[in-house]
Image (spheres, rainbow, N blue to C red):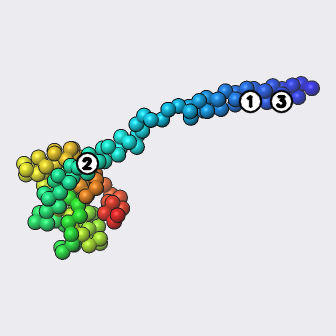
């Protein structure tokens, strides 16, 4: 008898807490969702990045810049570096091998030159190395496997 009463109490408690929880979920789902979402914020930032890239594309992807990768391939990316950057040398080597594999070139932009440092600032980049692709800005060192996905699209 005591066992049945305890079991009954547990079931009653579970039922009592489940109903209000479901009621809260239903009320949350019914709220107005016209407010901007996190996806909207990223979409706006991505669009702003694409606008910056488009404004500077002639400079960024200039085939007359120093490049790495396939000698006759199209310039499909740019990479900002500088001689004193510890991560830049290995990143250039890794990206150069990837660019060779993909049959493309990557412009290597040395920010120790003032006009290149200005270009980097205009693009709102603040880490070295940083990468510019036709559709995105990538801040900081990135493994080749990640860059390959972007460059293969």
Question: Can residue 66 be seen from the camera position used here?
Answer: no
Query: Where, by quadrant of the figure, is residue 103 drawn?
Result: bottom left
Mark 3 = which residue?
7
Q: Is residue 10 left or right of residue 21?
A: right
Going 20% across and 58% down the picture, which residue do you hit?
A: 78
Question: Can residue 59 be seen from the camera position used here?
Answer: yes
Mark 1 = which residue?
14
In front: 57, or 150?
A: 57
Mark 2 = which residue?
49
Question: What percent of the width, then of the height, locates residue 115?
Answer: 7, 50
Quadrant assignment for the N terminus: top right
Q: Is residue 60 left or right of residue 94?
A: left
In front: 87, or 25?
A: 25
The mark closer to the camera, 1 or 3, is 1
Q: CA distance from mark 1 to mark 2?
A: 51 Å
Q: Is residue 63 left or right of residue 19?
A: left
Q: Secondary structure at mark 1?
A: helix
**Label located before the other in sequence (2 or 3):** 3
């Amino acid at each position: 008898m005591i066992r049945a009463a305890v079991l009954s109490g547990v079931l009653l408690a579970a039922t009592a807490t489940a109903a209000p929880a479901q009621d809260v979920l239903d009320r949350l789902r019914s709220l107005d969702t016209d407010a901007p979402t996190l996806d909207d914020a990223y979409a706006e930032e991505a669009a702003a990045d694409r606008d910056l890239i488009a404004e500077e594309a002639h400079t960024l992807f200039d085939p007359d810049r120093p490049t790495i990768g396939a000698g006759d391939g199209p310039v499909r990316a740019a990479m900002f570096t500088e001689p004193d950057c510890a991560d830049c040398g290995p990143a250039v080597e890794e990206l150069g091998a990837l660019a060779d594999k993909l049959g493309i070139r990557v412009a290597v932009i040395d920010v120790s030159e003032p006009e290149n440092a200005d270009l980097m600032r205009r693009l709102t980049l603040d880490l070295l190395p940083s990468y510019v692709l036709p559709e995105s800005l990538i801040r900081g060192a990135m493994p080749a496997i990640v860059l390959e996905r972007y460059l293969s699209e």
